[in-house]
Image: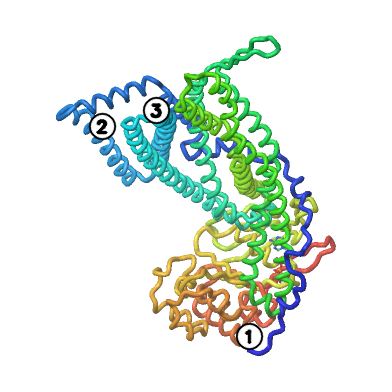
Amino acid sequence: MTISTSNVSQKQELSWEQDGLPDLSADERAIGYRDLATYSSIFSFSARYWGGLWALIGSVVLIAFFAFLTTSEQVEERFMKWMERVQQSSGQDLFLLVGLPVSIASFSVLFYRWHSKKHPEARVVRAWILSAFTLFLASVSVKLNVAFALWSKSFYDAIQNRNEPEFWIQTGVFTVLAVFWVLVGTYRQFFQQLLQIRWRTWLTQIFSTQYFDKSRFYYLSQQSKQENPDQRIAEDLDKFTELAIYLYFGAYIAITSLYEFSKLMIEISGDLAFTRFGIDVIIPDYLFWTAVVYAIFGSIFISFVGRRLIKVEVLRQRYNAFFRYHLIRAREYAEGITFLRGELNHNNESRRLFGIVRSNWNTRMWALKFLGFSSLSYNQASVIVPILLMAPKYFADKAMTWGNFMQILRTFGELRESLSWFIDQYQNIAELRGTATRLFTLEKGMLEVDAFNERSPLIVTPNNVGGIALGHVSLNRPQFDDFGVMHEQPQVLGIDWQISQGQRWLVTGASGSGKSTILRAVAALWPYGKGHIDVPSKGKIQFLPQRPYFPIASLREALAYPAPADMYQDAAYETVLEMCQLSHLKTRLSEENTWGQVLSGGEQQRLAFARVFLQRPDYLFLDEATASLDIENEKTLYATLLEFLPNITLVSVSHHEQLKTYHTHALHLSADALGGFKAKTQTI
Ligand SMILES: Nc1ncnc2c1ncn2[C@@H]1O[C@H](COP(=O)(O)OP(=O)(O)OP(=O)(O)O)[C@@H](O)[C@H]1O
């Protein structure tokens, strides 16, 4: 190929990096904090997977139960006693102490697996068991952290005292603890992920089913300004489940650790006594209180700094989705764009949309910078602050060992970490709220679509009479005002139209008069208007739009769509292709392709007709379904149709006069004085 008129790269003089960043503050202002999903709505949305509202109470009980097990000293004592008995026992006792619990645990796991396979619908049971198990592992990891803090005292004391045997014993203890820690940590993560994919699958099933059910995906764009609902189903559900699970279990660990390490800290911290200005001051458990005050102030400060990030995150997802959608559209309309030489426009639009992405990133970067300054300084300060706090006591109190020192340091760190959990998770919480907001708006949008459609005074009822009847039907078209609110504008007014079985109607009228809209109304896809439409309850109705749809699949599947390909024999496929002068495609039945793009417009329309011959409807509505064909091909197709399905009830929308021969009646739309269109019927 020698001619290339599109020269996208040469026309771009400035690098995109040099573009000024658009001001997006209006978008940010448009999101009110009150519009963001509340914590309670996030909780009740999450609870649905675990069985609804009761799940909230159930989870509190479950968490309290595990928290009690984790923090109870009695449980700890019993465990230690059990360990001692295991060490001293042999033979039968050992089996009772170790073998029995292990057998019960293994049996439970096997039973669980069997039950899951047998009752895959027992979602709630499985969710609870998995959650309980993950909580158990979380509890164990908290206990292990406490054990590490206790270990550090013995270990460092052994070093300070140059006690070699003790040093090796403590090294052994560390190894055992570390092995458990790795095992528990890894399995906890694994089970969290398992829970996540199950929850996500369940949610995706619900959202996707709702989206496609009752053609909601079709109405959404007409009735509300829902941005990229596809992204919400594909990405936001993923993000939501990931973050929610991470945060729920994280919060549990933070709270139980907080309790455990507070207890330990109070035990080991001691009081601080000093005299200033002649006054004796005693601060009881001073290290504990300093850690609390330190972490709380840090949290408040950092949450204040990070507040803006919530909005920026919401917008980031939105802008990225716009950019991606723009590129997807280019792929869909590749030919239309290249014929018009619209590559440059498209690239410029890419540049504009990406400029928005950049600008948002820039804001995010700055917001994160402030957050980074604050949280990193806080983290660094946390290294030295406990040492400085302990120093006076260490120098004054000769009984304080290096082991004590290290233990306090470790405990202070753990305590601070659990207290500052909120700080570390600030961005995740922001993201979770943003994601939840988008999911809730999609859910709300779908409910609004239902409510709107149910309220519609345009009633479509299936009847047994046969034929189709429109009585006092007026149709409107939806239109958005400047505030994004939908209004209805009159389109076709006062239609009274009887289509008896076997009649063949030709619908004509100026472009944009509302011919397709009438067909949409008969297909019960148009809730905008009023009146009654009776449609046959028996018999197959098929609609052929101007631009037929073919899935990206084999030609066989594309023809059979929406029925499965094995519904018809290959001979049937070949016959219908021949009937539509598409014999050259007979050898390509198994080929997978994007048929909507590789076939010519006329070929696509003929292929849609082949689908009609395959599926043999009783009522057929053709919306300019032969508009791309030459006169001869169009005539042949109509002749074949009437020969093959002589009793068919046919409604064709067309601008082609020559089609009159194949029809018995006509409906014409003409402009009326009120700005809409009116319908007139006659026999041909
Ligand atoms: N989904 C929609 N949302 C809003 N307006 C719509 C929608 N679909 C169609 N319209 C508007 O309704 C009017 C009638 O459209 P319709 O497709 O019924 O016209 P038509 O008579 O079939 O035109 P043509 O002969 O050009 O196909 C047009 O002004 C169109 O812009």
**Disc 2 to disc 1, how far (Cα)?**
81 Å
The answer to which of 567 and 536 lies nearer the viewer is 567
Q: In this orientation, does residue 133 appear?
A: yes
Image coordinates for residue 568, horizontal then vertical, percent: 40, 72
Ligand 1 shows up in the quarter that is: bottom right
Whichever of labels 3 and 2 marks the residue nearer the N terminus, that label is 2
Q: How busy is the neighbourhood of tag 3: few (under 14 within 10 Å), some, or many (20 plus)?
A: some
- Which residue is the site of mark 1? 630
Instruction: Name which residue lies at 71% across and 73% down.
Output: 508
- Disc 3 vs disc 2: which is toward the camera? 3
The crowding category of the residue bearing disc 1, from other C-alpha atoms within 10 Å (few below 14, some 14 to 19, many at least 20), is: few
Q: Amino acid at mark 1?
A: Asp
Disc 2 target residue = 101
Is residue 87 found left or right of 258 in the rendered image? Answer: left
Pointers 2 and 1 in contact (C-beta within 8 Å):
no
Q: Which is more toward the observer, 351 or 509?
A: 351
The circle on residue 377 is none
Residue type highlighted by circle 3: Asn
Q: Earlier in the sequence, mark 1 or mark 3?
A: 3
> Left or right of 182: which side holds 245?
right
Find disc 3 in the rendering and name its residue: 161
Residue 329 coordinates in the image, percent (x, y): 64, 67
SS class, disc 3: loop
Question: Quarter holding the C terminus?
Answer: bottom right
> Circle 1 — which element?
loop
In this orientation, which residue lies closer to the viewer: 118 or 647? 118
Hey, which quadrant is residue 521 in on the image? Answer: bottom right
The vertical placement of 201 against 263, above or below, is: below
Q: Amino acid at mark 2?
A: Pro
Mark 3 and mark 2: Cα distance apart in space? 40 Å
